Structure formats: C-alpha cells, structure tokens
Amino acid sequence: MKKNKSQISIIIPVLNEEKNIAKLLDFLRKNISKANLVKEIIIVDGGSTDNSVSIAKENGAIVVSSKKGRAVQMNSGAKIATGDILYFLHVDTFPPKNFDFFIHKSISKNKESGCFRMAFDSSNLFLNFFAWFSKLNYQICRGGDQSLFITKNLFAKINGFNEEYKIYEDNEIIERVYENTKFVVLPQKVKTSARRYEEIGFYRLQFYFGIIHFKKLFGASPDKLYDFYRRKIAAS
C-alpha cells in the first residue's frame, strides 16, 4: 500500500439529513488524528429535498448525487473515491477519536476490512445489551451502524454493495467480506443514534430486525426483506 499520509475516503449516504450533516462533519474534523489520514469526505445524496446538499458543501465535503438507496449511494461514492481505504459511515454514527489512525494501523497490518465496536447514545439497558455483542468477531454480530472500512482493492474484488438490497445491504456485503478475508473488530467504539428505537420502540424494532435477519438466513429475496421492512418499520 502507498505510504502517503492521506488515504482514507469517508463515504456517507444521506437523504434529507440537514439536521445531522453539519454535526457529523464538524465531529469528524475535530476527531481526525494529528496524522490526518483522511483524504476526503464524500457525501452521496439520494435526492434530498431539504438543505442537505448545501450544508454538506458549506462544511467542506465532496457532494455527489445518486439514485436513492444506500447500496446504490455507497457504490456511487466508492466510484469517485481516490483513497486506498474506503470507510462507510452512517450520518448518525460518530466514530472514536483518532478513528483514521486506528483504521490505517489495522490496514497496515494486512487486514483488508473491519469495523469498530458499537455503543448507542442511550442509557437503555436493552440496547446496551445488544451493543455488547458487537465486540464479538462473528458475522451474525455485524451491522452497518458499526461502520465498515475496507480496502478499495477488496471492495472492487467483491463487486461492492449488492444494489438489489434496499435494506440489509451492510450485512450482505459483510457476509461476503467474511468469506474473502479475515475481518477485524477494533476495540474502540462508534456511538450511534438510538432515534429509530425511540420512535418505534426498543423491543419492537429489535424484534423486527431479528425477523429480517432470519428471513435472510432462510433464503428470503431482497424484495421480500424490503417488503417486510416497508410494512413493519418504515410505516411506523
């Protein structure tokens, strides 16, 4: 891998996130290591009708437009990324201080992909119980909120995100990553928003996520998974 000091491309898919973009971009700037290993921050907009795009540009991000859908958006970001490492981040997930250093250190040890452990921005014991499992290096314990870093070469090798998945795209790509390389779970934690749990209900939403997981495990198609999500979660 090249030894230049700026080789991480952060890719963030958004849709009508004007309330969260500035906060995240400011946080990233303040928590990048002194080595500054981040080459660029790419916001991939899926057709926002609010001020998401202008706010992202005002805060120094590269902004590209894409069709709606996180898999499509993240692939679009990866296509223009110039860093050797791709770091996929949700707009409501905040990585640990010096996150770029930890990612770079892991990749420099010939680890091609990995994530951080996860914590919620909530003191809810039920959520904290499930977040605890993110420390375990098993594919079943993975999820997009833990953030994913992957070398650009490996991302290309496995053909990126499967755009047939309107949901579950993070889990699906991580399943393929586990099949192709040794995945690493870093001990530092990202902090992710519990807003969806608070809106829908802690037990109810986790139950729905569990159903989606088992539907996929037993062969449900991407369309079947999305139909369940649309009826049970998006409509809530």
Image (tube, helix red, strand yellow):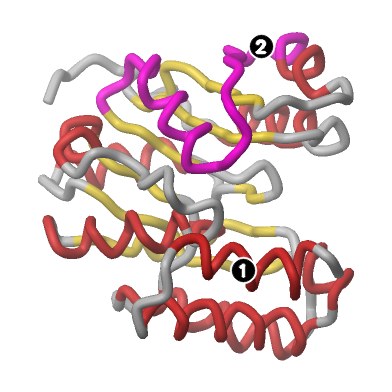
Does residue 135 appear in this view?
no
Image mark for residue 60: 2
Magenta stretch: includes residue 145: no
Q: Secondary structure at mark 1?
A: strand
54, above or below 107, in the image: above
Image quarter in which the N terminus is found: top left
Label 2 to label 1: alpha-carbon separation: 27 Å
Q: Residues within 10 Å of mark 2 (few under 14, many from 20)?
A: some
Magenta stretch: includes residue 71: yes
Three-letter residue code for mark 1? Ala
Q: Residue 24 sits in which quadrant?
A: top right
Q: Secondary structure at mark 2?
A: loop
User: Label 1: which residue?
Assistant: 119
Q: Residue 160 sits in which quadrant?
A: top left
Q: Residue at x 85, y 30 (%)?
A: 18
Is the Cβ of the residue at disc 2 closer than 8 Å to that at disc 1?
A: no
Q: Residue at x 41, y 31 (%)?
A: 75
What stretch of residues is rendered in magenta?
57-84
Find residue 94 and report its horizontal and vertical position in percent: 63, 48
192, above or below 103, in the image: below
- In this image, 206 relative to 96: left or right? right
203, above or below 15, in the image: below
92, above or below 174, in the image: above
Q: Residue at x 70, y 48 (%)?
A: 92
Find residue 76 and report its horizontal and vertical position in percent: 45, 25
Q: Give the mark nearer the N terminus: 2 vs 1.
A: 2
Find residue 68 and report its horizontal and vertical position in percent: 63, 34
Image mark for residue 94: none
